[in-house]
Image (cartoon, rainbow, N blue to C red):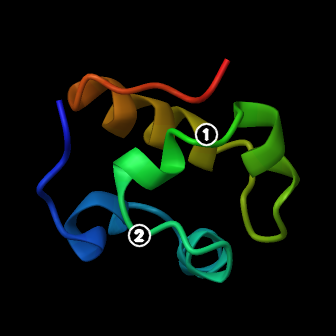
């Protein structure tokens, strides 16, 4: 299943630094986010441990997951 939600809707619950980190890496959708491993995303400046559960939940809600 692919997400039709806009970036602002999907990532709006994240802190601004996390939103900027996603933007800096060109992640504009959950499908794009699913191309990365969880450990990769966690190393991005601005993504903290509290962001990962929110991202995982958003991915799961749309039938997606981080890259294994």
Q: Residues within 10 Å of mark 1 (few under 14, many from 20)?
A: some
Counting from the top left corner in percent of width and height, residue 50 is at 64, 45
Residue 8 horizontal side relative to residue 39, left or right: left
Residue furthest out toward the left: 4
* Up/down of 30 relative to 24, above or below: above
Q: Front-most of 27 and 56?
A: 27
Spatial separation of the CA atoms under disc 1 and disc 2: 16 Å
Q: Percent position (x, y) of residue 29?
A: 36, 60
Quadrant occupied by the C terminus? top right
Give left or right: position of 62 versus 32: left
Relative vertical location of residue 35 with respect to residue 65 in this rendering, above or below: below
Q: Residue at x 41, y 70 (%)?
A: 28
Q: Give me the residue at 75% from left, 53% from top.
A: 48
Residue 38 in picture, x, y percent from top left: 70, 34
The residue that label 2 is drawn on is: 28
Indicate left or right for 48 with 53 as reference.
right
Whether residues under marks 1 and 2 lie with C-beta atoms below 8 angstroms apart, the answer is no
Q: Secondary structure at mark 1?
A: helix
Disc nearest the viewer among 1 and 2: 2
User: Which disc number belongs to residue 52?
Assistant: 1
Vertical relation: 50 (above or below) 68: below
How many callouts does the rendering have? 2
Labelled disc at residue 33: none
């Amino acid at each position: 299943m692919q997400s039709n939600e806009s970036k602002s809707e999907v990532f709006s619950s994240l802190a601004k630094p996390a939103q900027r980190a996603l933007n800096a890496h060109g992640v504009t959708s959950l499908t794009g986010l699913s191309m990365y491993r969880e450990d990769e995303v966690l190393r991005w400046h601005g993504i903290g441990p509290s962001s990962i559960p929110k991202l995982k939940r958003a991915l799961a809600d749309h039938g997606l997951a981080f890259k294994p």
